[in-house]
Image (cartoon, rainbow, N blue to C red):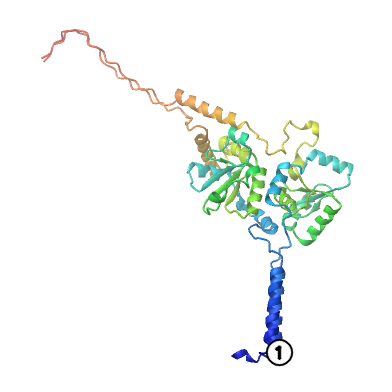
Amino acid sequence: MKFKHPNRSFVAFVVIFVLVIVIGLLTINKPDLKYKLSIDESVEQLMANEDKIYPEDLVGIIEMEEPGYVLIDLRNPYEFIKGHIAGAINIPTNSILSKDKLKMFNRYAADSTVVVLYGQTQLEANGPWMILKQMGYDNMKVLLGGYHYFTTGPLDFYDMPEIPEYLVEEPAYDYYGIMEAMGSKSGEDAGAVGQPQIVIPVRKKKESVVEGGC
Amino acid sequence: MNKAFYILAVFLLLLGTGLVLLPDREHSDEASPGELLSNLRNPSRFISTDKVAEMIISQDPALLLVDVRDMYDFLDYSLPGAHSIPLEEIMMYNWVDSLSYKQSQIVLFSNSDILADQAWVLLKRKKYENIHIMKGGLNHWFETIIQPEPPAETAADDEIDRYQFRKGASIYFTGGAVPLEQETSTEAVMVKRKNKTQLVEGGC
């Protein structure tokens, strides 16, 4: 056998080698980001539908300088510089999971500050909000309508139509009605202007009994 | 026997017990929050209403339309051939058959794109592939496909082409009858027979 007399330094080397590998395996690939909510819990939480901030309410919050709220702008820095809601902090979507930002979110969670996320539209904030929510940050809310509505839409409660524009999931049209109307209209048209009528010539019956012939 | 072998054996045993005592590694059947976040930035997660219309009309066998609104909305109106899987039940549904099939293209839609996006994030966390969101949802579908706005006369050619496609698609989806724009003036052909004037006509 080759290893009949392994010397001490060889054993020490093997031991250190194995140790390094084990420690490497334990530390590498260790996901430091984890979900706190299971899929089913997050579906439940979605259905509860509680994490919405209405733009008209946000106006009040900003004006009254209510404590316990912080605004996070998820758009990129260029858009942020061009204009943002007063008092907002810029955290672009792709950096919300960086270490220092998570530390910040942890701090907000600890003193139960409500974090209002907004993007250009509600859709932009939806994904980040869901991820943070599933990671256990319960204090996350989404601004309905996003920055776009906040800067363009009517914010006075009395100016708003019955279904404000920011409730994007409301059907904007009467789908069934439109389909009915368009379907039947084109049906009638087809009968009226459709194909040219086929004229069948009526043959005149011969009346006389006796006709000359060969 | 050499003492070193004993030391090595004991050491390996210790390591083995150590491994047994290690906490279970998170099962990786879920995408981590980081992966999910980077998936969010992938533009291919959206599919345009034009593309969906094209796929429906060409009867693409890979297309699986999923309406994530609730049942009542689905019964009122939905896209032709769509399946109704409300957001609430999206994880209860037996997706394995339809989703694991890698070639299929799953298109989620709702009235806008928020509900569809929420369903998308949930399914993406479970690492499903080939899921898309119909951009703008049914509201946008009615604006673009069912009731398309004619482009300005100075519009670029492809814009006019797109309008032509949308108008054709609108006819396809609303009933199939072609509204004739200019009346084709085909005159009815009348066959006129000459009246016989005489009762008895001579032959030969």
Relative height, residue A20 to residue B155 (above, below): below
Give the residue drawn at x 65%, y 92%: A5
- Among the 4 quarters of the image, the one containing residue B156: top right
Residue B45 position, x and y percent, is 61, 51
Going by the image, does A42 lie left or right of B44? right
Compare residues A86 and B157 and report the one nearer the observer. A86
Residue A176 in view: yes
Residue A52 position, x and y percent, is 76, 42
Q: How many discs appear?
A: 1
Compare residues B90 and B39 and report the one nearer the observer. B90
Residue A121 in view: no
* Label 1 crowd (10 A; few <14 / some 14-19 / many >=20): few
Residue linked to disc 1: A8
- Among the 4 quarters of the image, the one containing residue A28: bottom right
Residue type at mark 1?
Arg
Q: SS class of the residue under badge 1? A: helix
Quadrant position of the C terminus of chain A in the picture: top left
Residue A112 position, x and y percent, is 85, 50
Give the residue drawn at x 65%, y 57%: B31
Residue B171 position, x and y percent, is 50, 34
Going by the image, does A101 lie left or right of B66? right
Compare residues B11 and B131 and report the one nearer the observer. B11
